[in-house]
């Protein structure tokens, strides 16, 4: 095979973003991935299929909740096969489109597994060797296993199995109260499963601010059969009726299926990194600088293999930084805010400095909250179970972080990310005209609360008479 200027190993959101930009910048680019088209776990078995199914869950939920406003439907029926086909069709359209975009950019796409032989050569699955000047490792991650559980059973799922939607179990245990577990629990609860979630830590969504989680938790407890906190799984055993699960501190129970959602592990094995100077830490992440360059000058690493947060949008931006660095541009990956979104019902989203971080670091901040019960738009949606909070430096008035929980929080957080990145003050948000009636106004009104001038919440600024 010929020598490539840029070789990208892995075609997920980080890998294809890097490859596409490298090609756009005029660099001869080769992209290697195990699938027939770019897309990675995110498009094939993660972000996209999960959000397609969560949309279906939201439709079911809204139909049920419509009774409160005087509209009643007969009990819905779910055609699992048709729903699965629709979800798969969404995936096919997106990955097919990416394949066309790669061809339009004249990127050489090779389906296979690349293994580094040395800092400038890879072996590709019996297809020969390929030389390269620079490589970008974007091999992503995989579901983590539950420690101490070695059972192999079709009833024991990971996130990939859950998204396959082969059936809707009568009872489902979700092990892990993080964003993947809660999203999958939300989906299957809406589809009719009796869902129980178990989390070994004291709260759901570990690391997220408590006030955001509390609002989400109230609805989850309403829709789930049970939520166990501070509880570990002691063992799982297959029986004729299902999977018998032992809990520490709770009675053992039998579930038709168990979904393990205890995090993800970076994919670093089998790629020959040991044949380079790239350094892998004890958690399996590849060490990089602020351009994504590893200890091997010719090799970059981006996305899940390069460290947390393990998010598709973070990977995409890292990939674009790496491509620009290879092209000779003076760039670095140094964001002030990376949004995190949990696509539950309601959604939760945050960016920048969290209140939990501020308290842990002993930073002086002022936290202002606008409850969605005071939002006209939230009332018209019959969804007042929301809140928007700003974390502000009381001296400079800079917006350091934002948290939102409520319907559509994942879309609303974009304005907040821009505000933190641009170094906006609370007054910048307060003086920006927001369309009425929208839930986006809650950001403006939260900023007004900071100054004691909020129209819909009477809360004078401390010291103001």
Image: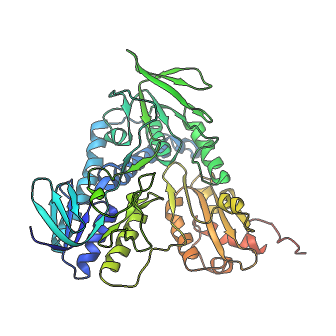
| Quadrant into which the C terminus falls | bottom right
| Residue 358 location (% of width, % of height) | 69, 63
What is the quadrant of residue 287 in the picture?
bottom left
What is the quadrant of residue 463 in the picture?
bottom right
In this picture, residue 133 sits left or right of residue 141: left
Task: Please give the name of the residue rendered at 38% of the width and 75% of the height, measured from the top-left corner.
Answer: 321
| Residue 93 location (% of width, % of height) | 24, 58
In this picture, residue 78 sits left or right of residue 348: left
Vertical placement of residue 41 versus 181, above or below: below
247 and 332: which one is in front?
332
| Quadrant into which the N terminus falls | bottom left
Task: Please give the name of the residue rendered at 60% of the width and 53% of the height, measured from the top-left corner.
Answer: 208
Residue that extends furthest to the top in the rendered view of this protein: 240
Residue that extends furthest to the right in the rendered view of this protein: 465
Task: Please give the name of the residue rendered at 54% of the width and 76% of the height, measured from the top-left corner.
Answer: 421
223 and 321: which one is in front?
321
The reply to whether residue 438 is visible in this rendering is: yes
| Residue 61 location (% of width, % of height) | 49, 43
Vertical placement of residue 214 versus 420, above or below: above
359 and 82: which one is in front?
359
Task: Please give the name of the residue rendered at 20% of the width and 58% of the height, measured from the top-left corner.
Answer: 37
406 and 212: which one is in front?
212
In this picture, residue 111 sits left or right of residue 353: left
Q: How is the image coloured?
A: rainbow
The reply to whether residue 453 is visible in this rendering is: no
| Residue 258 location (% of width, % of height) | 43, 30
What is the quadrant of residue 202 in the picture?
top right
């Amino acid at each position: 095979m010929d020598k490539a200027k840029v070789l990208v190993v892995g075609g997920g959101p980080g890998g294809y973003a890097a490859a596409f930009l490298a090609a756009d910048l005029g660099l001869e680019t080769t992209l290697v991935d195990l699938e027939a088209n770019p897309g990675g776990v995110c498009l094939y078995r993660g972000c996209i299929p999960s959000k397609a199914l969560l949309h279906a869950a939201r439709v079911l939920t809204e139909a049920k909740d419509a009774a409160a406003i005087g509209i009643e439907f007969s009990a819905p029926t779910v055609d699992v096969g048709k729903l699965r086909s629709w979800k798969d069709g969404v995936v096919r359209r997106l990955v097919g489109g990416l394949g066309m975009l790669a061809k339009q950019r004249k990127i050489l796409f090779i389906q296979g597994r690349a293994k580094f032989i040395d800092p400038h050569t890879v072996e590709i699955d019996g297809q020969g060797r390929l030389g390269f000047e620079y490589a970008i490792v974007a091999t992503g991650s995989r579901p983590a296993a539950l420690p101490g559980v070695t059972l192999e059973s079709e009833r024991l799922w990971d996130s990939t199995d859950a998204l396959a939607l082969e059936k809707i179990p009568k009872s489902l245990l979700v092990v892990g109260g993080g964003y993947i577990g809660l999203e999958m629990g939300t989906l299957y609860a809406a589809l009719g499963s009796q869902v129980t979630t178990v989390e070994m830590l004291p709260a759901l969504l570990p690391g997220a601010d408590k006030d955001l989680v509390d609002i989400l938790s109230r609805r989850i407890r309403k829709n789930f059969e049970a939520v166990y906190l501070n509880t570990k799984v002691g063992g799982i055993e297959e029986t004729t009726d299902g999977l018998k699960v032992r809990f520490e501190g709770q009675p053992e129970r039998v579930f038709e299926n168990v979904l393990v959602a205890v995090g993800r592990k970076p994919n670093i094995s089998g790629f020959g990194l040991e044949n380079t100077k790239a350094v892998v830490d004890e958690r399996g992440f590849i060490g990089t600088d602020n351009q994504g360059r590893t200890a091997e000058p010719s090799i970059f690493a981006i996305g899940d293999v390069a460290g947390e947060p393990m998010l598709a949008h973070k990977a995409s931006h890292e990939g674009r930084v790496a491509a620009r660095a290879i092209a000779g541009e003076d760039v670095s990956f140094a964001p002030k805010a990376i949004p995190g979104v949990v696509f539950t019902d309601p959604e939760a989203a945050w960016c920048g400095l969290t209140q939990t971080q501020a308290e842990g670091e002993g930073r002086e901040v002022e936290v202002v909250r606008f409850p969605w019960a005071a939002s006209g738009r939230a009332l018209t949606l019959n969804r007042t179970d929301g809140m928007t909070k700003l974390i502000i430096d009381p001296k400079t008035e800079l917006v350091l972080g934002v948290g939102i929980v409520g319907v559509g929080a994942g879309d609303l957080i974009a304005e907040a990310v821009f505000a933190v990145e641009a170094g906006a003050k609370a007054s910048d948000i307060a003086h920006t005209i927001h369309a009425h009636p929208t839930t986006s106004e809650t950001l403006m009104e939260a900023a007004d609360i900071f100054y004691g001038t909020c129209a819909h919440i009477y809360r004078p600024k401390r010291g103001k008479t």
